[in-house]
Amino acid sequence: MDEVKERKKSKLLFVVTEDWYFVSHRLPLAVAARESGFDVAVATRVGKHAETIKSADIRLIPFELSRRAGNPLREFLSLILLYRRERPDIVHHVALKLVLYGALAVRLAAVPAQVNAVTGLGWLFIARSRPARWVRPAICWLLARLLSAPRCRVIVQNPDDEALLRQTGVTESNMRMVCGAGVDTAAFSFVPEPPGPVCVVLAARMLWDKGVGEFVEAARQLKQAGV
């Protein structure tokens, strides 16, 4: 009788800075990939959500990467070592810093394919400080070359980010726009609006560039209008 060999599963590696973010924004996608036949793992900082990830049958790889300041060279080298050790077929980077470091590390580690989720362009693209103005052109130059590579896909979540990346020179055919990470309607179902006065909520971190100033000004104008 001929020996039947099980086809090797393609390995998909998510790389996310925080485990709570992976659970809230990417876990359903990872589960769907696993159910489709991928060998799925996530490399992330392990906090309070390790059991949630493991219970979904997603392999968890502890990985430290600062969301803000850090040692760029050390973090970049750690990504290369991670990819050479795990040998994934596809790497899925989430957020701009990981996209930038990871897209370069993918080349040096000879990873066959990559997905880069740009969840926002962040402080670097809105700051008016002199350091930001100096660094921004170099970052745009790098993004254009790294994200235009073959077997690379770039996910953006709004038309502004898509337009800016196109202006930097990212190959248009590499980009896909997905309007947000989505909502689990089984957990958050529709309910009718409650009676009474309208309540407006700003669902954001209390950072000025998140629109706090505009929200306060809108509230002031509505109050003056008697709304």
Image (spheres, rainbow, N blue to C red):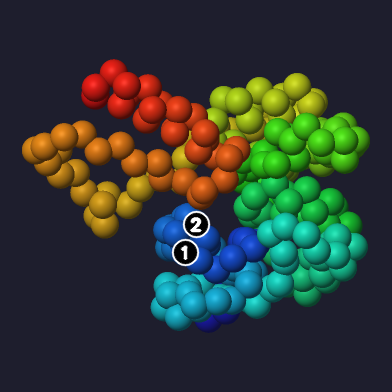
The numbered disc on residue 26 is 2
Amino acid type of disc 1? Answer: Val
Amino acid type of disc 2? Answer: Arg
Q: In which quarter of the image is residue 74?
A: bottom right
Classify mark 2: residues with Cα within 10 Å, few (<14), some (14-19) or many (20+).
some
The x, y position of residue 78, in whole percent, is 82, 69
Q: Distance between the residues labelled 2 and 1?
A: 6 Å
Q: Is residue 10 at least partly visible in the picture?
A: no
Q: Name the residue under label 1.
A: 23
Identified at 47% across, 55% down, the residue is 25
The x, y position of residue 133, in whole percent, is 85, 33
Q: Quadrant of residue 35?
A: bottom left
Q: Is residue 169 at least partly visible in the picture?
A: yes
Labels 2 & 1 near each other (Cβ < 8 A): yes
Looking at the rendered structure, the secondary structure element under dot 1 is helix
Count of marks placed on residues: 2
Identified at 63% across, 69% down, the residue is 44
